[in-house]
Image (spheres, rainbow, N blue to C red):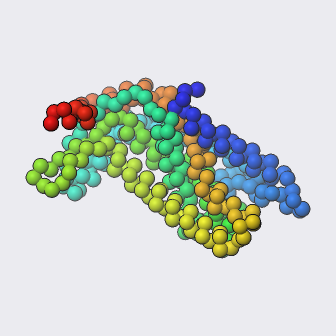
Amino acid sequence: MEKKFIWILAGFILSIGLFVIITVFGTIKIGPSPLIPREYISQFVVIIPGPLITDILLLYAIPILFFCLFYYMAPYLIVLYIKLHQFCYWLIRRPSKYGIFKMGTTVKSGRLFFRALIVSLFSFSISVLVVQLGGGDLFRAKYNPFSIFSQAEAVFLGTFALCAFMIILFFPIWLLEDSGLVSYRVFYDERMPANIQGVHSIYSNVLLGYAGLSTILALFNYIIKTLQKVRLDDPAILTPIILIILPFVVTGLLAILIYLYEYFFARNKERIQLKLARFNFPEIKIPRFEEMKADN
C-alpha cells in the first residue's frame, strides 16, 4: 500500500468499524430495548432497500459503479465542462484564454483525503437540507420531525446514502483538475488583478463554499439545541459529537473509488489529452517565484 493512500485507508477502517459497532450494539440489550434502535439493523437507510448488510454492500459498490461509468465517459465530460466554462464567461463578456499546465506526477495522502472529505461534507450539507425540507423519513425509519435527535439521526443516515451519489458531481471535477487545464485572464487597462486558475475552480469553489458554510451552520444548530434539551451526563449529548466526526467516517465509502482512480490515472490521462488536442491549447509555463524575483 502506497503512502498516499494512508488517510483514505484510515477512513475505510473507520467506516467498517462503525458498521461493526452498529451491528454489535444492535444485539446488546439494556432492559427491553437494544443499544441501537432495531430499525438500524432491519432497514438502516430507509430509501435504500434491504437490511443493514445489503445497505453496506450498496454504499461501497455504488461509487465503484460510477467509476466504471465515468472512466469511459471521462474525455467527453472534460469537453462538456470546458464548454460550460466558456459559456459562463461569455455571458459576463469576460472571455478567457486557455492553456495546459504540465503538472508533476506525485500526489500527497492529504490531498486524496481532502477530496473524499469535501464529498462527505457536501453530502452532509445536502442531507441537512433534505431533512430541513421535511424529507427526514426518506432516511430514518420512525422519523419524528419534531425531535432534534430524530432529525440528527436522519442527517446521519442521509449522509451515508447521499455520499455514494454525490460522486456524480465531483468525479468530473477531479478529472478536470488533473488534466492541468487553466484559464488565463489579464486586463491591462483595468484595475483588476491577473487571474490564472484551474478551469475546475469555478465548479469546485461553489461546491466547497456551500458545503463548508452549511456544515458549520448545521453543526452549530444541532449543538445548541442538544445542549438546551439534555444534561451533560446524558448519553444523548453524544449526538452532536457523532455528527462532527461523521464526515471523516463517511470518507471510507470512497476509499476503493479513489484507489481505482489513482490506479488507472495514467491511462485515463492519456485518453483525456488526446481529446484535449482538438482544442490546440498551448502549454503554459509558470515560472517559480524565485525565478521571477531574479528577473526583477
Q: Horizontal placement of 98 versus 242: left or right?
A: left
Q: Residue furthest right?
A: 31
Point out residue 185 in the picture as x, y percentages from the top left corner.
Answer: 20, 46
Q: Nearer the viewer, residue 163 or 62?
A: 163
Location of the C terminus by quadrant is top left
Residue at left 26%, top 36%? 289
Tell me: residue 39, above or below residue 254: below
Q: Nearer the viewer, residue 134 or 31?
A: 31
Q: Horizontal placement of 37 versus 275: left or right?
A: right
- In which quarter of the view is residue 131 placed? bottom right
Point out residue 291 in the picture as x, y percentages from the top left corner.
Answer: 22, 32
Q: Horizontal placement of 195 versus 120: left or right?
A: left
Q: How many badges with numbers are in the image?
A: 0
Residue at left 55%, top 27%? 2
Instruction: Tell me, yes or no, if residue 98 can be seen here.
Output: yes
Q: Horizontal placement of 190 versus 104: left or right?
A: left
Residue at left 74%, top 55%? 40
Point out residue 189 in the picture as x, y percentages from the top left corner.
Answer: 10, 52
Q: Nearer the viewer, residue 94 or 47?
A: 94
Residue at left 80%, top 57%? 35
Tell me: residue 78, above or below residue 157: above
Instruction: Tell me, yes or no, if residue 260 can be seen here.
Output: no
Point out residue 262 in the picture as x, y percentages from the top left corner.
Answer: 49, 31
Location of the N terminus by quadrant is top right
Tell me: residue 51, above or below residue 271: below
